[in-house]
Image (spheres, rainbow, N blue to C red):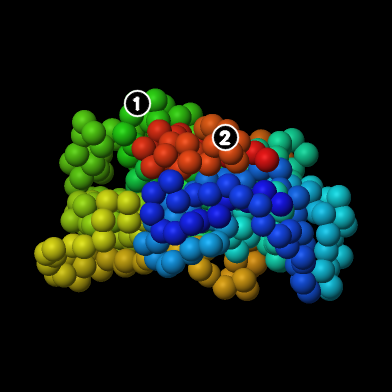
Amino acid sequence: MKAVVLNKPGGVEQLKLTHVKKPVPQDNEILVKVKAAAVNRTDIVSREGTLEDLTGKILGVEVSGIVEDIGGNVNIPIGKKVMGLVNRGGYAEYVIMHKSFVMDIPDNLSFEEAAAIPEVFLTAYQTLFWLAGVKDNEKLLIHAGASGVGIAAIQLIKNLRTNVEVFVTAGSDEKLKLTRSLGANHLINYKRQNFQDEVSNLTQNEGVNIILDFIGAPYWQQNVNSLSIDGRLVLIGILGGTIIKEFDLQALLQKRIQVTGTLLTPRSDEYKSKLKDDFLNDSKILFEQKKIKPIVDSIFTIEDIKDAHTYMAENKNSGKIILVL
């Protein structure tokens, strides 16, 4: 089968389109004929070898497609349209998916739209409700508001909580306009505005209750300054760097701030299965009613995988980048 294999950690030139052996599903697994896969920040990190060496591996953690074959202890019908997380391998014509990760594709969604759901919506759901515990009437700041996770988070919070005031940062007016259309209340262009000052002015110096951050070290001090008493910071990315050269821990004590870091991909199968179930219980009807929706920014063929990675690395996308096979 056709697949994109990482030659070695590095730049986009290390992504090699080649042919590999078609996988065979084992017990509790299904084989999916991939129709679409998504490009995620975790793929960029994996390609660069920041967290682990995936030399010789196939990247890609979410797909949509058709069930081609099943292993033992599986009663999912062959031919069924599905979407879901995979433990890498998504940039290929076929991929193995654990049966507990399988999600039905709503009838009103295309394969491209379906591939834009699993990773970012599950990450957003986990971050908002399992980790940050967002409550009604709180104030929430989402950095990178026009990213896949940001877009998912805005929609989920506006539909599953009452009167949550959503602040977002993004680097262009076009991206901010998109977040406004999804329900964001306060728009901050980080290239022209200091988000700490904006949050302070908009909250009468009280700060926000929760911050979802993809940036890391460069935003650390401003994030702490922007949080209210008993504020919660959830770190889900380190795009700006990992090292904080100097920080006064007293601020955490004075404000009683909780700091949580998380990655979804390395979590156990049991964790991701439970997360999927909770997410579907809360959101399935919202997708069917079109109250929440995946936003697809652009579509690339698998042959253009290097261009897709470059496009994401340059922060050009508002919403998801999809690969079609």
The reply to whether dot 2 and dot 1 touch (C-beta < 8 Å) is no
**Lower position in the chain sequence, tag 2 or tag 1:** 1
Q: Residue at x 21, y 31 (%)?
A: 192
Q: Is residue 221 visible?
A: yes
Judge by depth and name the residue closer to the eye, 268 or 291: 268
Please name the residue that numbered disc 1 is placed on: 173
- The percent position of residue 134, horizontal first and vertical second, equals 44, 57
> In the picture shown, does residue 301 fall above or below 100?
above
Q: Residues within 10 Å of mark 2 (few under 14, many from 20)?
A: some
- Disc 1 crowd, CA 10 A, few/some/many (<14, 14-19, 20+): few
Q: Quadrant of residue 262?
A: bottom left
Q: Give the residue displayed 33% in from the left and 29% down from the top.
A: 172
Of residues 76 and 287, which is closer to you in this image?
76
Give the residue at x 48% y 63%. 55
- Numbered disc 2: secondary structure: strand
List x then y, in percent, for residue 80: 83, 50
Count every numbered label the image shows and give the total.
2
Could you tell me the amino acid type at mark 1? Asp
Q: Secondary structure at mark 1?
A: helix
Q: Position of residue 200 (x, y in %)?
A: 20, 44
Provide residue 161's location: percent of width, then percent of height.
51, 49
The answer to whether any part of residue 164 appears in the image is no
**Vertical comparison of 308 with 19: above or below:** above
Q: Which residue is mark 2?
A: 300
